[in-house]
Image (cartoon, rainbow, N blue to C red):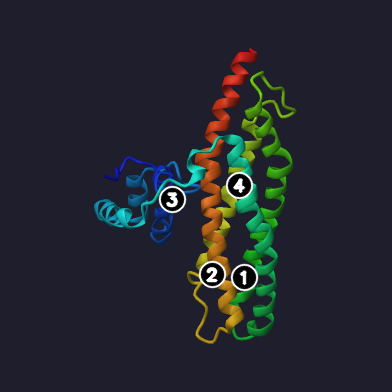
Amino acid sequence: MLSLESTLGQLVTANPALAGELERLHLDYCCGGQDTLLDACIAKGLDPSEVVELLENLAPAVAAEPEGWTTMGPTELVDHLVTTHHRYLWHEMPRVSALVDKIVGVHGGRHPELVEIARCWAEIRADLEPHLVKEEQVLFPLIRQLASSTAPQDFHCGTLASPISVMLQEHDAVGDLLAELRTRTDGYRPPADGCASYQACFAAMAELEADTHLHIHKENNLLFPVVLALDSRRTSVRR
């Protein structure tokens, strides 16, 4: 039985396949993963009882063995994030940019809305690339160091709360940009005269949005709370 008091993040961690339905309902389980299902439904003007019924009917059809990332420790989860989501973004972002450039060049005259779509996509990429670098080169190595040691750690940033706070703010910013991109592309629906490249571009954007939402969920709602709790305990011991 699904509880209206469960957070959106808890629902996806317990049954990751529900992420797709929450996406369809525009219920933000990544940056808004701490919101309860009840509060999220009210905020979106959805009937909570109808949403619970929908998810309960869907859950048996999509239920499977829990995915490995739901029970990973910090080091394993960091490695998973890099090899799964970071690698995906590094591969896909240049491809999407090339598709955007192509459709703007071919269709921009008939579809002036592409100018703002291209601008929004460029901002998303400009936000994500340095964000990934900071995680891979700074935060994630510190998390590995923290998780592998039993002794109190002296980090140059004091505690990991500070860099994690920055990552959370950047997650919110890219989440807002992705929401804007979805609106400007009419839910990633290409126009009737859209060519194969137009369709491929919007499909790639939709896939990247869904993957990034799951990516942020794993960090915001699984990795960061565990790391902050571990860091807090180590800080207390040092004092």
- The residue indicated by pointer 4 is 81
- The residue indicated by pointer 3 is 16
- The residue indicated by pointer 1 is 116
Q: Amino acid at mark 1?
A: Glu
**Element on which disc 4 rests:** helix
At a point 24% along the width and 51% down the height, the residue shown is 49
Task: Name the side, left or right, on which 224 lies relative to 9.
Answer: right
At a point 53% along the width and 34% down the height, the residue shown is 225
Q: Amino acid at mark 3?
A: Pro
Q: CA distance from mark 1 to mark 2?
A: 8 Å
**Element on which disc 3 rests:** helix
- The residue indicated by pointer 2 is 184
How packed mark 3 is, by other alpha carbons closer than 10 Å (few <14, some 14-19, many 20 or more), is: many
Compare residues 189 and 2 and report the one nearer the observer.
Answer: 2
Q: Quadrant of the N terminus?
A: top left
> In the picture, residue 198 is in which quadrant?
bottom right
How packed mark 4 is, by other alpha carbons closer than 10 Å (few <14, some 14-19, many 20 or more), is: many
**Element on which disc 2 rests:** helix
Report the mark closest to the observer, 2 or 4: 4
How packed mark 1 is, by other alpha carbons closer than 10 Å (few <14, some 14-19, many 20 or more), is: some
Mark closest to the chain's N terminus, 1 or 2: 1
Mark closest to the chain's N terminus, 3 or 2: 3
